[in-house]
Amino acid sequence: MSETIYDAFSEFSKKFARFKKSGESLPKRKSEDDFLQDKINAGEAARKQAVSKSYRIYRDPFGELGKTSERARAIYDDEQALLRAYNLFKAVTEASGGKSDKETFVSSFTIESPLARKNAYTFGGNFIYLVCHLMFEEGVSDFVPVLNEEGASYRLSFVPAASFRFEQKDADVIRIVRETFY
């Protein structure tokens, strides 16, 4: 029995000596911080992939969803509705600025838009993709469209981009879209 223990110990010593000579180090155990960092990295990668997939549809709805897709048609129509609303807003503000004085001016106006009645934009969080489309594809950088809650409904308005701060989740979407597509 003692020979068996001796043989096992001798065999282990030989393997250990070969391991030390090979220059390899013992495998490093991952710390809890490493596991957490891996989890954060995986979550960020999944988020980037989801944002990229969603924006790809808004960037080219018919190319991504098909020429006869009703959803593609709806997204395209929504993009056009937002662009029309922006152009209308710009026309009114420019006309007011050029033709008004201290006593006669446009004090307020409301833009009606079907976008303010769509759950995908008011509750679903997809409005940021329309905003990205307006910013990156249409080149609008002076104003940011915003859906404001007013009682039980929403209103579309535009805020000067220089003074507007996006919520963190929307700022992340914009960052990912910029990095991925532009």
Image (spheres, rainbow, N blue to C red):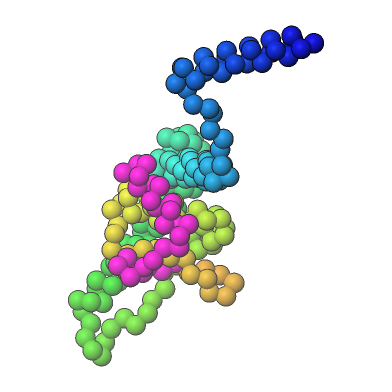
In the current view of this chain or complex, which residue is farthest to the front? Answer: 2
Residue 167 lies in the magenta stretch: yes
What residue do we see at 66% from left, 15% from top?
9
> How far across and how far down the image is residue 169, in percent?
48, 57
Residue at 56 percent across and 18 percent down: it is: 16
For the record, the magenta segment spans 156-182
Q: Is residue 101 left or right of residue 124?
A: left
In the image, what residue occupies the spot 40% across and 40% down?
60
Viewport quadrant of the N terminus: top right
Q: Where 119 falls versus 107 (above or below)?
A: above
Q: Quadrant of the C terminus?
A: top left
Provide residue 88's location: percent of width, then percent of height: 33, 65
Quarter of the image for residue 11 reads top right
Q: Position of residue 148 (x, y in %)?
A: 48, 70
The location of residue 135, given as percent across then percent down, is 33, 54
Residue 108 shows up from this direction: yes
Residue lying at the far bottom of the rendered structure:
103
Magenta span: chief secondary structure: helix
